[in-house]
Amino acid sequence: MNSVNQIKETVEEVLKLYPEKALKNRGKHITVKDESCEGCALKSNSKTVPGVMTARGCSYAGSKGVVFGPIKDMIHLSHGPVGCGFYSWSTRRNLADGTLGVNNFVPFQFTSDFQENDIVYGGDKKLERILREMVKLFPEAKGISIQSECPVGLIGDDIESVARRLSKELDLPVVPVRCEGFRGISQSLGHHIANDAIRDYVLGKGTREDVGPYDVSLIGDYNIGGDAWATKKILEEIGLKVKNVWTGDSNLEMLQTAHQVKLNLIHCYRSMNYIAKYMEDNYQIPWMEVNFFGPTKIKESLLKIADFFDETIRENAKKVIAKYEAQMAKVIETYRPRLEGKKVMLYVGGLRPRHIIGAYEDLGMEIIGTGYEFAHNDDYERTFEKLEDGTLIYDDASAYELEEFVKKLSPDLVGAGIKEKYVFEKMGVPFRQMHSWDYSGPYHGYEGFPIFARDMDMAINSPTWKLVESPWKGNAIKGVAAR
C-alpha cells in the first residue's frame, strides 16, 4: 500500500480541479486513515455539491426500493408519474418465495400514473379508485403501501386521509408513506421515513402464540440473491428461531408481530437502526449488529450472538463453526493463491463498504479505498477500526473523483454499483456490482462465501482482460483512423 502522505498528495491532486468553494467542500468528505487516527473523521450526510455527479438515490428509493419493496404479500403503489416506478422496477433482486399475484407481489410494479390533470386537480379520488381496483384484482393481498413521489407532496395531496378511509372500507392495512424524493439529501431519509411508517401503522398490530426463548428477528437483510435464506439457515442451525426478517422474503404478519422476539440482529445498520432502537426503547428488545460475510466474521458474529443466550446455544454455535471449518478452508486454499495481495476499492451504500472487508481479507486481498454513498458519521466510526493505515476513505464521491482515484491507485478490482460498472469495465478494470451481486449470490453465510470467492476470482483473473483495449488508448485510436 502507498504511504499515508502519498495518498494525501493524490487526494490533493484530484481535488485541485474544483473551484475554490467546491474544493473546500469536497475536501471535508475525503480522508486517509493514519496511525494517529487524525484522519479518522470526515463530513457525511450533507447535501451533494450542485453540479457534481453523485451516485446517491432519493427518499423514494430508500423507502420503496429498500425497505418496503421486499415485503412480499403487500402491494406497493408508486404514487405519482410512471417514471419513478418504472425505473425502480425489479432492480434490487429481492428474492421471495410464494405464488405470484397471490402472496408474492415483489416482481410486480404498481403505479398511479399521474397525468397533468392529476397535478392540477389533485389525485386523491384517483388514488381511492386504484386502491379499490387493487383489492378487486388481487383479493389475497394482505395490505397496501402508498409510496408517495415528488409531485404528490408538492401539490399537497392528503394520502393519509385516503389511507384511513380505504383501510376501514377495505378492511385492510393501507400504509401512507411520505417518501417524496425531494425530502432529505439521499435515500437515507427514505429508510428513516419507511421505518417510521412501519412503526406507526404495522409494528405491534398482531400477535403470535408460538413465542419462545430463542426467537430472533433478522433486520436489514433484503435477501439480495438469497442472502437472508443463507443467514437464516445458519441461525437456525445453532438453535435460534428466526421469526421475522426485515424485509427480505418477509410478509406483513412478520412485521406486525416483530415486537415479540428476544433479540434483534441487525445486518444493515444504516437502513434499519431506527426501528431497532425504537423496539429497544419501547419493547425492551436488545439489538446487535452482525456480519455474515466471510468465515472470520461469521464466526465472530455467531459467538457474539450465542453469548447473549445460554450454554446450549453457545455449544451449538461452536459445533456449527467446526462443521463448516474444513469447507471454508478448502475455499480459501483454492482461491487465496489466485487473489493474494490483490488491491480492492469499494464504493457502495448501506453496510457493505465495511462489512465485506473481512471476506476480502479472508482471501488475502487488500482494501485500499472504501466509501459510502449516503453514510452518517456513526457508519464511518464503525468503519475506521476495520481499515489499515493508508486506506483512502471517501463520502458521496463524485464520478470524477472515483475515476481519478482508480486511475492513480490502480486497484485490481473495483466493487461499486451499476452506475459505475460499465465505466470501469471500459477502462479495463475488473469490476463487481456490489449492490446486487451482479446477478449472482448469495454472498452471506457459509453458503455464500464460496460463491463470493469464485466471483472475485472470475472478475480479476478472467482472460478477457487481456483481449480488452480501451478506445482512448493509442493503438485503438490509430486503428479507427486507418479504417
Image (tube, helix red, strand yellow):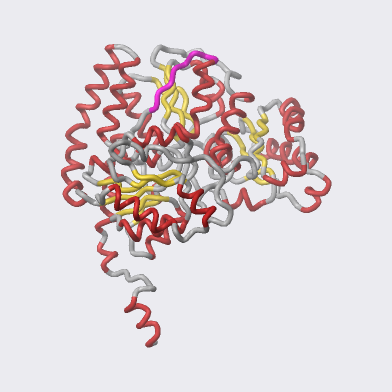
Q: Nearer the viewer, residue 409 or 339?
A: 409
Up the image or down, 265 lies above or below 344; here it is: above
Residue 223 horizontal/vertical position (percent): 43, 37
Q: Is residue 72 visible?
A: no
Q: Nearer the viewer, residue 18 or 351?
A: 18
Q: Nearer the viewer, residue 182 or 25?
A: 25
Where does the C terminus fall, quadrant-wise?
A: bottom left
Q: Is residue 264 visible?
A: yes
x 30%, y 45%: residue: 452
Residue 3 horizontal/vertical position (percent): 26, 49
**Left or right, residue 21 beside residue 406:** right
**Left or right, residue 90 beside residue 359:** right
Tell me the magenta residue range.
Answer: 282-289
Q: Residue furthest right?
A: 121
Residue 482 horizontal/vertical position (percent): 37, 87
**Left or right, residue 11 beside residue 324:** right
Q: Is residue 237 magenta?
A: no
Residue 114 horizontal/vertical position (percent): 73, 49
x 52%, y 16%: residue: 281
x 45%, y 59%: residue: 400
Q: Residue furthest front?
A: 20
**Left or right, residue 214 beside residue 150:** left
Count of numbered circles on the image = 0
Q: Is residue 283 magenta?
A: yes
Q: Residue furthest bottom?
A: 482
Q: Nearer the viewer, residue 39 or 90?
A: 39
